[in-house]
């Protein structure tokens, strides 16, 4: 015997499918996301968007490249220290370039208050940190 459908099911099936619009973060913006490597009790952490805007804004792109920020002081050559004045976060932060990762746009959460967009110079330093993490000389790529 067939399944009995309610009126809501019939309306939903007759309506064109509606997919929610994904966030379109800009390169250099700070967003929040829960990373798979974070402990279960940790809520979203700040990340900086490092993928190019052509990818970030593309309607079919469901992911972006991000680099996490931490409050742990910089200890490695791949780390970049930032002050609250550079980010508008409440504490000093460290960009951990060696932890670059891909996240779903749907997992991004906007900050509760306005944060600063990182400068082109800082984004270049992040790229250099990623190269160092990969064992590639940043000066050899120019």
Image (cartoon, helix red, strand yellow):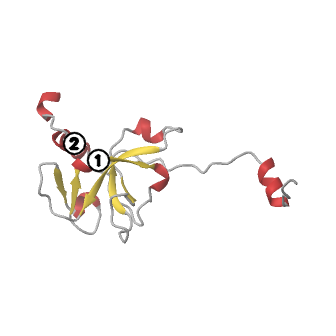
Q: Decide which of tag 1 and tag 2 comes sooner along the chain.
A: 1
In which quadrant of the rendered image does the C terminus lie? top left
Q: Nearer the viewer, residue 16 or 82?
A: 16
Query: Is 135 in front, or is 1?
Result: 1
Q: Secondary structure at mark 2?
A: helix
Mark 1 near mark 2, Cβ–Cβ under 8 Å? yes
Whether residue 105 sits left or right of residue 98 in the image: it is: right
Question: Where is residue 93 drawn, in percent x and y?
Answer: 22, 61
Residue displayed at 15% across by 38% down: 135
- Depth order, front residue of 42/86: 42
Q: Height in image: 47 above or below 130?
A: below
Identified at 40% across, 62% down, the residue is: 111
Residue 17 on image: x %, y % = 70, 46
- Residue 130 numbered mark, or none: 2
Q: Residue at x 28, y 50 (%)?
A: 118
Q: CA distance from mark 1 to mark 2?
A: 7 Å
Q: So how many labels did they put on this image?
A: 2
Residue 89 spot, x, y in % from top left: 29, 65
Classify the position of the N terminus by image quarter. bottom right
Q: Quadrant of residue 91?
A: bottom left
* Relative to 28, 104 lies left or right: right
Q: Is residue 45 left or right of residue 93?
A: right
Residue with the mark numbered 1: 100
Query: In the rendering, which numbered label is found on residue 13?
Result: none
Q: Is residue 142 shown to the viewer in this render? A: no
């Amino acid at each position: 015997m067939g399944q009995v459908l309610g009126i809501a099911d019939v309306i939903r099936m007759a309506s064109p499918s509606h997919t929610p619009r994904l966030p379109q973060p800009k390169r250099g913006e700070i967003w929040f996301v829960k990373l798979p490597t974070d402990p279960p009790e940790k809520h979203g952490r700040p990340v900086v968007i490092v993928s190019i805007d052509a990818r970030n804004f593309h309607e079919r792109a469901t992911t972006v490249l991000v680099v996490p920020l931490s409050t742990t002081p910089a200890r490695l050559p791949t780390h970049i220290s930032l002050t609250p004045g550079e980010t508008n976060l409440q504490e000093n932060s460290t960009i951990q370039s060696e932890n670059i990762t891909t996240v779903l746009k749907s997992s991004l959460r906007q900050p509760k208050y306005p944060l600063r967009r990182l400068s082109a110079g800082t984004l270049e330093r992040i790229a250099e940190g990623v190269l160092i993490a990969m064992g590639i000389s940043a000066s050899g790529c120019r």
